[in-house]
Image (tube, rainbow, N blue to C red):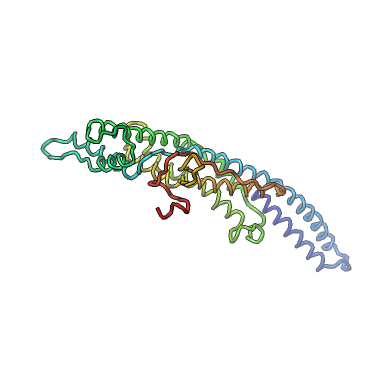
Amino acid sequence: MRQNKWLVYSTFATTIASLVAAILIGKSSNCIQYDISMAIFGSAFLGFIMSLIQYFAERRIGMEKFWSEACKALDQLKAILYPDIDAPIDMVMRCFREEKNNQSIKNMPKELNQHPKHNAKKELIAWLEENHKLETSDRDDEQLIDKSYKKLLKGYYNRIIKCIETCKPILQYDLGPLDNAFSNLDFLFEKPSFCKFGKQSFREYIYNQIYCAIRKYYEFLQANNYEFQQLEEKHGNFIMCADIIVQLRELVFEVKITDDDKEPYKTKVYQKNFYDIDINLEKFRTKIYRKADYQPPECCFVFAAKEYRDFEVKVKPDSLKDQ
């Protein structure tokens, strides 16, 4: 698009310059300079029309290419799995750290006089008992409680590992075609008044709301790819990888609860930020095809639970905000 844009500019400038020269010379002068100016004007004007036609053809091709690559990159991100941890994530993470520290203490010389700690474990067990999530109802049987606790922690561990697995195809995805497609976008009219996107030009809108909005998730994962690779090779730190998944969960997902008795699922999880990108991609699509109707994408939940999960809620209905 860039070369076509500058071809339009150059042929338009030549057309205007030759026309002005012909007017200044005047037809009555009857000299060769006037004939040359008119010849240049005619060929430049024809070139201007042809370059405009070529620009708009390349404009559609370039915009279609970017839209296609952006949709593919976004579809890869949508595969990120929500870590279904049915307990406060900060408590679970403290338990993981405590278990790791206790394992390290077991391998230390006895002369150091270090003893395992179980504060985080007791805190999580108390929460699980209060919310009826332990498999045993006998609170005096420490062995059964410990067995149920370890089983739950193992389940949480497996869910986080599964989330890490869903990130690996994203790390292997090549963003080169998306980068090339964006760099090829170069419009004739960049002023906000032409684009109707507030104070942003059309290209700035695409850059901020689509291109960077997609790239930031890839860059976040790429920045932490080393930790995932080390974990896969059995040399990594699971705690660090779990922290990355927790951060990703905050970046990607939005949890909502409802107090509607007719609704079977009280807690729903949405990929809210990806939905916003979807909306901007649909707006972009309507700019490719002038007569295209705006068809807003459907915002579907990616995970649902039948119980209230107030401990991880970001958005509550009005009737629950004071609770």
Q: Nearer the viewer, residue 22 or 99?
A: 99
Question: Picture quarter containing residue 244?
Answer: top left
Q: Is residue 77 visible?
A: no
Q: In this image, 87 relative to 109: left or right?
A: right
Residue nearer the viewer, 152 or 8: 152
Q: Residue furthest front?
A: 261
Percent across and percent down for residue 122 are 25, 41
Identified at 46% across, 46% down, the residue is 257
Residue ID at (68%, 46%): 60
Does residue 169 appear in this view?
Answer: yes
- Answer with left or right where residue 148 lies relative to residue 111: right
- x and y percentages locating residue 308 in the rendered image: 42, 43
Residue at x 54%, y 39% (from the top left corner): 75
Residue 168 appears at what percent x and percent y? 44, 35
The total of numbered circles placed on residues is 0
Which residue of the protein is positioned furthest toward the left in this rendering?
111
